[in-house]
Image (cartoon, rainbow, N blue to C red):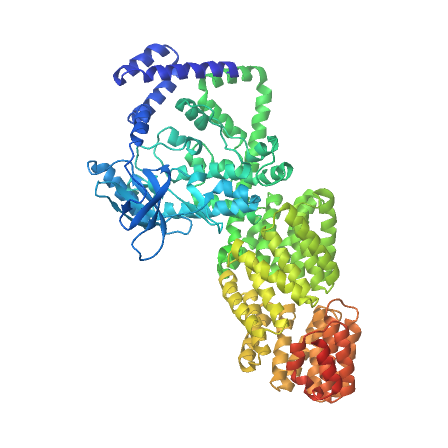
Amino acid sequence: MTPDTLQIAWQQLENLFYAVLELDPQDRQGFIDQACGSNSELKRQAESLLAAITKTDGFLERSIANTAESLEMPNVVIGQRFGAYEILRLIGTGGMGTVYLASRADDLYEQNVAIKLARIPLAGDPGMLSRFRSERQILANLNHPNIGKLLDGGITTTGIPFLVMEYVEGIPIDIFCQHKQLDTAGRLRIFCSVCSAVEYAHKHLVVHRDIKPANILVNAEGLPKLLDFGIAKLLEPNLGMQAQTVDRMMTPEYASPEQMRCEPVTTATDVYALGVLLYKLLTGCLPLQLITTSPLEAAMVICEQAPAPPSEIVRRSKAAPPHGAAADAHHTLRGDLDNIVLAALSKEPSRRYASVASFAADIDAYFHGYPVKAIAPSWSYRVAKFIQRNKAAASAGAAMLLALSGFTIAMTLERNRANREAETSRHVTEFMTDMFKISDPSVSHGDTITARELLDKASSGIEAGLSKDPQVQARLMRTMGSSYKNLGLYPQSVALLERAVGVQTKLLGNADPETLQTMSMLGAAYGGLDRYPESEKLLRQTLAEQQRIVGSDNEATMVTLDTLADTLTREGRYAEAEGLLRKVLVAQRRILGPENRALLFSNNRLTDNLRNQGRYVEAENIARDSLAINQRVLGPYDAVTLSSIEELALIVINEGHPEEAEKLDREGLRISTHLYGPDNEHTLLELGDIGDALQEQGRLTEAEPIQREVVEHLRKTAGPKAAHTIEMMTTLAITLSMEKKFAEAESVSRDALDASLQTLGAASVQSIDNTVNLALILAHEMRSGESEALFKRAVATSSKTEGNTLANVFYAYAEGMAILGHSDEAVDRLKQAIDHGFSNRQQLAADDDLESLRTDPRYQAIFRELQ
């Protein structure tokens, strides 16, 4: 059927429909039979429309009468009282009536509210009164931060029911996003807040039915509030989650196909409306343009016309989209976001997301780089739907095509069969990927045992289970390797990622974006095992290929650059690492926006880098700003927020504020336990940080048992030569030394130094720190020659490092010489520490190891200069 013949058929149906509306109900079927004659398809569609009209009990015919009735408003005047509230002004009309701004007038307290009045008195209409009472009870049961609250309600002396609701002073969500110039990520986050409210309502058996920007106001704090649940209907469980019918107009632009067909409304209806809302937020346009006032034409558009992908709308638009340059927005929306929105806008409710929670989960998966469940409708599915709508034309066309192109169709079917098999593999992959995702601490919330067992079981059977599809096998290896890395299980992560790189290199080559992404993950996992040279080499190789193939502005490229910078920081190459971090932050801010999760994580790495350089004031300013943003954007239970807390604690303890550090560390321990579980390495390190803060406060009897417990656990879980184990052994040795337990302190310190030399090498910052700590312990034992030899070795090694390492070595050297009574050398070493950047006057004043220098004029001069 050509477009011209389709237009003619449509015109025939429209003319017939309006002719039927002019007839009495009993005459309509006869007229259809006579008018259609032998045209069975025209008769079928006309009878379908007639059934819809009958089902609505004269909905279209009574719309004008209903509109006239709605004008019969109650005679409300400014200053009139409703219970304890006094009317201030009219806000607008909608839902079951009219909304007024009012204020509490009983002098108990001040409060502005919104009062919603029914259009007409309900005393004579028990059904309407019952519905109003149901509405009031629905609202009373809903308690969610993103839903406008019901505060009070009643019936006036003239029989007019009213509801007193929270007054939300805000602007519609689409205008808010435009006014704030939110990027795509910002729009998705505020949309997910709306989803949270709708999902909450659905769990309480309430469907909103009229989700649109005008019903979602955003206040000055950026909090969206979903309003007007007055048109919602309580869902009856014995009706199979189908809403009771209601004689109510919907908003056509946001109405679902089933609403336009007057079919029962379910939670899937709200999923569709949310899809329309998200389309509008991302493109600035509605998915379907209703340029007609004809109800039939509007229904035809909504029920039959497929919306263009959001990325295509942005690409076509001459004006810039609402959140950035057209080219960038097109690239961002294309693919997963297109599929997510279009899945919500499916014509059939069964093909939409099963729940609003599933909708939001796909957006979360997009945020975190996981595969989304939404996929573009296949060619075969679109053809099947076309045939279902146009049976006669499709049959004739198919016969002709078969006659002309039998061989071509056979080949096409074979191709489609192969595509279906590939699609099946993708479904298997995405299902298993989604299952493995629970090991991410932000999802598993500390249930690491179950996640670990799942990963171990899956990884042991992955080769046998997917041996016929090595590409899918490699993708799952990468997913599981990433999950192991998220749990801090680096040996298992490296093993899987190395296998994945091998398979992908063989199948795709080492320059394929998929292979490069896996190589980047492997480089990060090497860093987790302190294999920094291997990490740096692989990351540099990967970065060069990504910049050549996908470009420097690609997100995967930025992740690799960020990971390389972190590796260089761990190696003590702070200046080079800082330059890379600032470069990646500029790119992330330009491309991803100022509140993107990846950018916030890179900010944490920059503060870590600056702290290691001894630039505490600069690091603290960035850390405090980052923590506030992370808590607002990501929430408290997010790994990036936890990282911000950890960084700030490390900074303030270096600045001489151990009390604040302890408070931050205890909050970090609570969050880490929630995210990773109590026995995870990350949580143990948080506990160790609390021990460090107690040590700095002189609370040694509290610090020592904590540090012993952490060291013992880390030896068992991470291994005796792991970097974190060595670090905690070092702090335990310091505590033992402060407690005058020098013999045990020396033993622990030597074990830590031996392990760091074997694992990290003599030039590593950790090995230098361990050398200095052992030298100080030996000084306390008055073993002057051994102590001085170690100090000199530390100076020679640290002279090649960056940051504040050399300053710290000279300061410790001064402490050792003061302990040994070598005051001249102690003063000289203290001056060298200051020359290399030491400036902590508070530490100098409180340092008991320097007690022998307090009366020395040279020390007093140094102290004054620091002031």
Please provide percent x and percent y for residue 122: 23, 38
Position of residue 652 measured from the top left corner of the image (x, y, whole percent): 61, 70
**Measured along the vertical axis of the image, is residue 566 above or below residue 687?**
above
Question: Which residue is at the far left?
Answer: 124
Q: Is residue 354 left or right of residue 537?
A: left
x, y (%) of residue 589?
A: 64, 49
Which of the pair 770/759 is nearer the observer?
770
The reply, left or right, for residue 691 in relation to residue 220 is: right
Residue 146 % position (x, y): 42, 49
Question: On screen, 493 above or below 766?
Answer: above
Report the quarter where the C terminus lies.
Answer: bottom right
Quadrant assignment, res 460: bottom right
Is 162 displayed left or right of 815 in the figure? left
Quadrant of residue 65 within the rendered picture: top left
**Residue 610 visible:** yes
Q: Is residue 2 visible?
A: no
Count of picture labels = 0
> Is residue 564 left or right of 43 when viewed as pictured?
right
